[in-house]
Amino acid sequence: MYVNYWIELLKSEGVNMGLDINLKSYFKKDISYVLFNVLLVIFGISVILRLFYGPFCGIIPYWIELVPKLEVFLGGISVLLILGVLITEYILK
């Protein structure tokens, strides 16, 4: 959904990266596609948190304690999302 939007936006700007990805075609069910998109967003958030962990430690005092707790929480959600994708794709018919 979001990947296709950005690819179409880049193509409309004249940028052709040679990527004609239809991510939805890899999933049998729509709910697993949505869960995978949420997983990508969670992964992006965790990468952003990790990138800004070092620079913001001196600026925000509670950042040292907050980021590891958030990463554990996001990791748990990621595991549940991966299990959700696997269950909806392979177990549910």
Image (spheres, grey):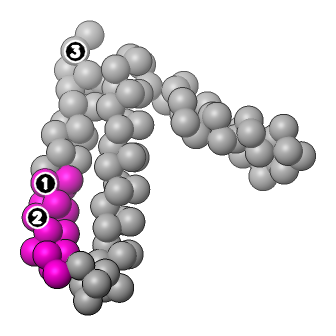
Q: Residue furthest top?
A: 93
Give the residue number, with chain letter if any, for mark 1: 73
Give the residue number, with chain letter if any, for mark 2: 69
Label 1, label 3: how many angstroms apart (C-alpha)? 27 Å
What element does badge 2 sit on? Answer: helix
User: Picture coordinates of residue 27 (x, y %)?
Assistant: 44, 25
User: Picture coordinates of residue 75 (x, y %)?
Assistant: 18, 55
Give the residue number, with chain letter if any, for mark 3: 92
The answer to whether mark 2 and mark 1 are in CB contact below 8 A is yes
For image coordinates 19% across by 75% down, the residue present is 63
Is residue 19 visible from the viewing direction of this image? Answer: yes
Label 2, label 1: how many angstroms apart (C-alpha)? 6 Å
Give the vertical position of 85 relative to 56 (above or below): above
Q: Residue furthest bottom?
A: 58
For image coordinates 38% across by 75% down, the residue present is 51
User: Picture coordinates of residue 86 (x, y %)?
Assistant: 25, 32
Q: What are the residue bounds of the magenta stretch?
A: 61-75
